[in-house]
Amino acid sequence: MDFKDVVKNRYSCKSYDGRKVEPEKLAAILEAGRLAPTAKNLQEQHIYVIQSDEGLAKIDNCTPCRYNAGTCLIVAFDKNNVYTYPNSTRESGVEDAAIVATHLMLAAANEGVDSCWLNCIDLDKIAQEFNLPENEEVLMILDLGYAAEGAGPLANHSNRKAISETVTYL
Ligand SMILES: Cc1cc2nc3c(=O)[nH]c(=O)nc-3n(C[C@H](O)[C@H](O)[C@H](O)COP(=O)(O)O)c2cc1C
């Protein structure tokens, strides 16, 4: 798909028909995450693919926002392998994982797969439910799947500020 169409077509899907993402499409989505840039190329991301009934039930224990998606990705990163910027206390983990997650989300749109970025979640509970390693921090969950019949973008999807409100040429 043309990149402009990918960006234009993507929206946060909040009702799915429950179908799982096909392995070939999932592989293409995960590959886009693999190719994302990270600070110092540390590649500290760790992505968990959840598709089993048991795993999806665990997601439901932590957030009401799975919306019947048949596939969820948990995007986490290794807290012990992040870059601390010089003269700063800022670390790269959240930033790097967010770039990876954005690649995953846009690659999904490119594959014709609907998605929703979730962060209204008890992230610690996710880590507990899935028994994730102590050194990993969860950034977000990406719902993936196919919109249920009649579902589509919410009204706020088409409500974006004008470029002049968010961009300044200096
Ligand atoms: C960082 C972030 C966190 C979000 N968390 C949630 C969430 O927990 N639950 C949810 O239903 N949508 C969530 N969303 C989706 C936003 O509500 C949605 O992207 C926004 O309203 C714009 O709509 P659009 O993506 O359809 O353009 C999140 C989006 C982002 C970028």
Image: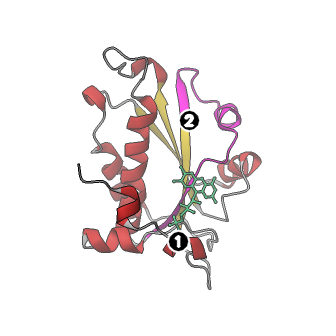
Write down the quadrant of residue 70 in the picture.
bottom right
Q: Which numbered mark, 1 or 2, is in the foreground of this view?
A: 1
- Taking 151 as reference, is 161 left or right? left
- Residue named by callout 1: 157
User: Which mark is drawn over residue 138?
Assistant: 2
Report which quarter residue 25 is drawn in. Answer: bottom left
Q: Amino acid at mark 2?
A: Val
Check disc 1 and report its element: helix, strand or loop.
Answer: helix
Residue drawn at x 61%, y 80% as measured from the top left:
151
- Mark 1 or 2, nearer chain start: 2
Note whether ligand 1 is within 8 Å of mark 1: yes
Above or below residue 14? Residue 83 is: above
- The boundaries of the magenta stretch are 113-138
Furthest-top residue in this view = 87
Q: Residue at x 29, y 30 (%)?
A: 39
Viewer-proximal residue among 117 and 156: 156
User: Residue 166: x and y, percent?
Assistant: 39, 57
